[in-house]
Image (cartoon, rainbow, N blue to C red):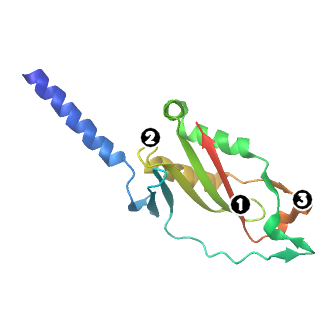
Amino acid sequence: MPFLLFIVSIIIFNTSFAQELAIKEGTYVLNEITYKVDSLNIYDRCVIYRNQRPQLKPNRSIVDGLPLDYIDLELTNYDVLVNKVRTLLGKTKCDVLSRAGERILFTFIFDPEGRIIDITFAINANGILTLLDIAALDKDLRESYTGTFKSDFNGHKHLYWIHYNCYIRF
């Protein structure tokens, strides 16, 4: 009987612990930064971003006859981003994410020099990543990652900001 009680208490503890780590829709403060979590029920994903979004000046549409809406942009140091994310999460967590088939979708807003203005993350709503993981990625990438770009005629240099989507599959 004591063994059965021990097993039941472990199951209850693990269930409540998992629920505390689960990412739910709402507003959270971590390290004095407010994050917003929105739900995307269609794809069973949630979107996480800082609550205070930057006000972006509208990009110009044409510079020197070049239509800036159609810039073919390439992030030339995507491998650096992948390595930073994998290093920060650690091998063990990356292995678990890989076995679960998870990925992180990023929506970056960069300035023309590649500095991050804003990041939005999309992850599995009931996945392995926690809000603490995302907050750590957010902090580290903002502090230490600079995107490098290539575009025809360096068109990206004429933009006030660059919108770039990518993902990392584990």
- SS label for mark 2: loop
Secondary-structure class at tag 1 = loop
Image point (59%, 50%), residue name: 105
Could you say where residue 28 lies in the image, as x and y percent from the top left? 40, 61
- Residue that label 1 marks: 115
| Mark 3 residue element | helix
The structure residue drawn at horizontal position 69% and vertical position 58%, both measured from the top left corner, is 164
**Does the residue at mark 1 contact the one at mark 3 (Cβ under 8 Å)?**
no
Q: Residue at x 27, y 36 (%)?
A: 14
Of residues 117 and 66, the one drawn nearer to the viewer in this rendering: 66
Of mark 3 and mark 2, the one earlier in the sequence is 2
| In contact (CB < 8 Å): disc 3 and disc 2 | no
Q: Earlier in the sequence, mark 1 or mark 3?
A: 1
Query: Which of label 1 and label 2 is nearer to you?
Result: 2
- On the image, the x and y values in percent for residue 45 come to 48, 51
For the residue carrying disc 2, how many other residues have a C-alpha within 10 Å: few (<14), some (14-19), or many (20+)? some
Tell me: residue 112, above or below residue 7: below
Q: Residues within 10 Å of mark 3 (few under 14, many from 20)?
A: few
Q: Which amino acid does label 1 sit on?
A: Arg
Q: Distance between the residues labelled 3 and 2?
A: 39 Å
Q: Residue furthest left?
A: 1
* Residue, disc 2: 128
**Picture quadrant where residue 114 is located:** bottom right
Q: In this view, does 133 lie to the left or right of 69?
A: left
Q: Tell me the residue at 18%/27% (across/down).
A: 7
The kind of residue tagged 3 is Asp
Location of mark 3 (residue)? 152
